[in-house]
Amino acid sequence: MTIIAQRMGRIQPSPTLAVTKKAADMRARGENVISLGAGEPDFDTPDFVKASGISAIEQGLTKYTAVGGTPTIKEAVRHKFQRDNGLRFKDEEVIVGTGGKQVLFNVLLATVDAGDEVIIPAPYWVSYPDMVRLAEGTPIIVSCGQEHGFKLTPESLASAITPKTKWLIINSPGNPSGAVYSADELRALAGVLDKHPHVHVLSDDMYEHILYDGVQFATLASVAPDLATRVVTVNGVSKAYAMTGWRIGFAGGDAVIIAAMAKIQSQSTSNPCSISQAAAATALRGDQSFLQERNQTFKERRDLVVARLNGVEGLSCPVPQGAFYVFVNCQGVLGRASPSGGTLNDDVALADYLLSQEKVALVAGTAFGSRGYFRISYATSTEALTEACQRIERGCAALR
Ligand code: GLU
């Protein structure tokens, strides 16, 4: 007999957060660990945004707010959707929650019944399948290989849809692959969805602003307006504005779904943090030009990591077009023996080896539904990345 509910047996702790904790614990013990685990910008929250949070406290904006967000943040979210995506939402069609994670969770909890299927292209962000399982749904994982740029094709979408399909989750730029869907690619998926009016789409646009090489961002609700009533578009301030700790995410979509999400919030968190809402509204409405500067820094780091790792025998590293991750193919080093004995049969063993031997924390591809890969977050300093690449190189060279 256990006190723990059966539903807990269906999920595991977030692997990205677990590896981050492991690295932090090792560092606390005095070990010189480089953590490339969690996806979190190393930049600071911009000063004008911090000032807005401080001013919110001073003004006494420290009380409960409306469940789905203050009028100010909802207005800022609507403004953002229109400015950046050409999407016009009414007040009752947007909601603000405690991070993109809670917003996604609430969409699924509000809509998924036992046995409903949710199509998740792999590699996927680690939390999608477990959120679906907590909602008693069934994740349908569709493998999207490197040969397709880690993107879902219309053919594989069509063959994954069943009468039980409730949602398709699209994440672009993608975590962990950095793959970006073009408007044409989204239109091709929309062509399939046109034939299946029971399928809704969760568009996770969290990395919208982190793009390279002149690639343009596209989101399904704007490229396929006839589908828009079936799309919930999710975004947040964590990645673009380096505001991970403030925990503000938001969504725009059908008012019935948004109302159901608000009902959950009213019974769980009441409202997202009042101070964070004020600061996030300032971030969304403020000068956006710093995003370009930060992207330039991210791009330099991406190029550094891709070039270094492609030079390591046994590793290959496609060039991602967005987000701040590289998803490294490590199949060439698997099956080799570590110097301390034991064969590294899979990416999990390799990640463990690199952490224990070389003190580099990264996340095994298995956590994202793609064996034979690992993810590096390059949202950290050039010095740390250079040192980490050296360690990975040394660790791989020591395998026999
Ligand atoms: N989304 C980030 C990541 O993939 C942050 C950690 C998490 O919530 O999973 O690393």
Image (tube, rainbow, N blue to C red):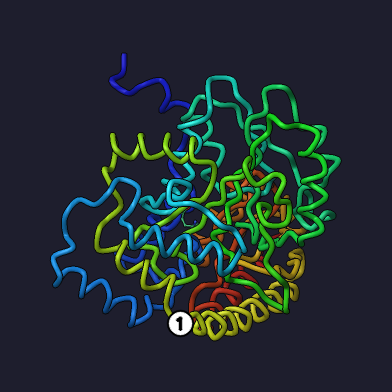
Kind of residue at disc 1? Asp
Query: x and y percent of residue 241 in the render?
Result: 44, 72
Q: In this rendering, is residue 194 above or below 250?
A: above
Residue shown at the point (60%, 80%) measured from the top left: 301
Disc 1: which residue: 287
Label 1 Cα crowd, 10 Å radius (few <14 / some 14-19 / many 20+): few
In the rendered view, does 142 fall on the left or right side of 273?
A: right
- Residue in front for this viewpoint, 150 or 387: 150
- Residue in front for this viewpoint, 296 or 113: 113
* Quarter residue 331 falls in: bottom right
Query: x and y percent of residue 89 in the render?
Result: 52, 53
Q: In this rendering, is residue 224 above or below 201?
A: below
- Most distant residue in the top direction: 1
SS at circle 1: loop
Query: x and y percent of residue 370 in the render?
Result: 68, 47
Query: x and y percent of residue 27 in the render?
Result: 35, 66
Residue shown at the point (50%, 60%) measured from the top left: 355
Q: In this rendering, is residue 136 above or below 293?
A: above
Q: Quadrant of the N terminus?
A: top left
In the rendered view, does 230 fall on the left or right side of 387?
A: right
Q: Quadrant of the C terminus?
A: bottom right
